[in-house]
Amino acid sequence: MTQDKRLVKEGSARSFGRVASRMSPEAQKQLETRIEPFLFDPKNLPKAERITLEIGMGNGMLLFERAKANPDQLFLGIEVYKNGLRSLVSKCEKEGVTNLKISNQDAREILEDLPTGIIDQVCLLYPDPWPKRRQHKRRIVNQDFLKAVYRVLKEDGEYFMATDIPSYLHHMIAHVHTFDLFEAPAVKPQDWGTPPKWWISTKYEKKAYKEGRFPWYLTFHKREITS
Ligand SMILES: C[S@@+](CC[C@H](N)C(=O)[O-])C[C@H]1O[C@@H](n2cnc3c(N)ncnc32)[C@H](O)[C@@H]1O
């Protein structure tokens, strides 16, 4: 793909903050070696009947539990922040979980390298809120991102988002509305406050509750295109 068609172009705003903290170059190197068996190549994925992709998985504990409970499915987790990946790799090693694969790169680049129509579910859980108006350009949800998510999803694929930030909720809904190729199966407003069956509270969600914020859960399906 040519540079000007990529989601992340030279000088593009980053959608994330830190990529590592309090980790010496040596510790980072060690992590890279341990992570190696868990890395996935978006252009050459292992075969699986069902594939779930989580973008910005943080410490990856929700994805870990889902992978452990569904050993015949494949779970792909992307996270640029290295620190959280240490405990995830340790847990996978200790509990012999091999159906969870990791990428430590920008999710927008990985999305573009994935084949078309192969993912059953894409999850974006508590994306960095970037609350100030001048930071909004950093929000990962935009039209190009939705287009990339739409492309990788299977025809009956699902796009799931969670946020605790009212202005991000509005941002998500406005973008999905403009994009127009997803539809929401939610039937009453309360449904947006109810987590899906597979849900386990993430680290960020627990923090949100502690600080008095509440989550919204948004499920979308690909809309059938009728001509
Ligand atoms: C607010 S945290 C939420 C983490 C986790 N989903 C949770 O609920 O605990 C958002 C995470 O998304 C990651 N992130 C943001 N943009 C990303 C990108 N383009 N590619 C990969 N990870 C990204 C950040 O590094 C951060 O860890």
Image (tube, rainbow, N blue to C red):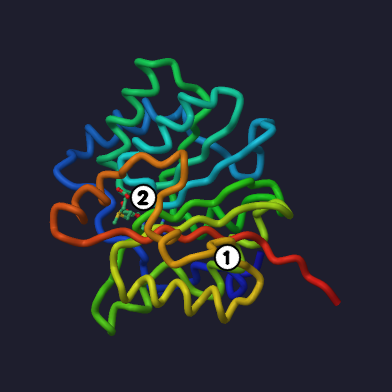
Tag 2: residue type?
A: Val
Tag 1: residue type?
A: Ala
Residue at 39% x, 23% y is 92
Q: Is residue 155 above or below residue 167?
A: above
Using residue 18 as the reference point, say whether residue 10 is left or right of it.
right
Q: Which residue is mark 1?
A: 184
Secondary element at image label 2: loop
Secondary element at image label 1: loop
Using residue 224 as the reference point, say whether residue 125 is left or right of it.
left
Q: Which residue is mark 2?
A: 80
Closer to the camera in the image, 100 or 195: 195
Residue 192: image location, x then y, percent: 42, 61
Residue 126: image location, x then y, percent: 34, 57
Say which quarter of the image contains residue 189.
bottom left
- The quarter of the picture where the C terminus appears is bottom right
Residue 105: image location, x then y, percent: 44, 50
Residue at 31% x, 40% y is 59
Mark 2 CB near ligand 1 (8 Å cut): yes
Residue 72: image location, x then y, percent: 61, 24
Say which quarter of the image contains residue 125.
bottom left
Q: Earlier in the sequence, mark 1 or mark 2?
A: 2
Closer to the camera in the image, 120 or 44: 120
Q: Residues within 10 Å of mark 2 (few under 14, many from 20)?
A: many
Using residue 85 as the reference point, say whether residue 199 is left or right of it.
right
Say which quarter of the image contains residue 178.
bottom right
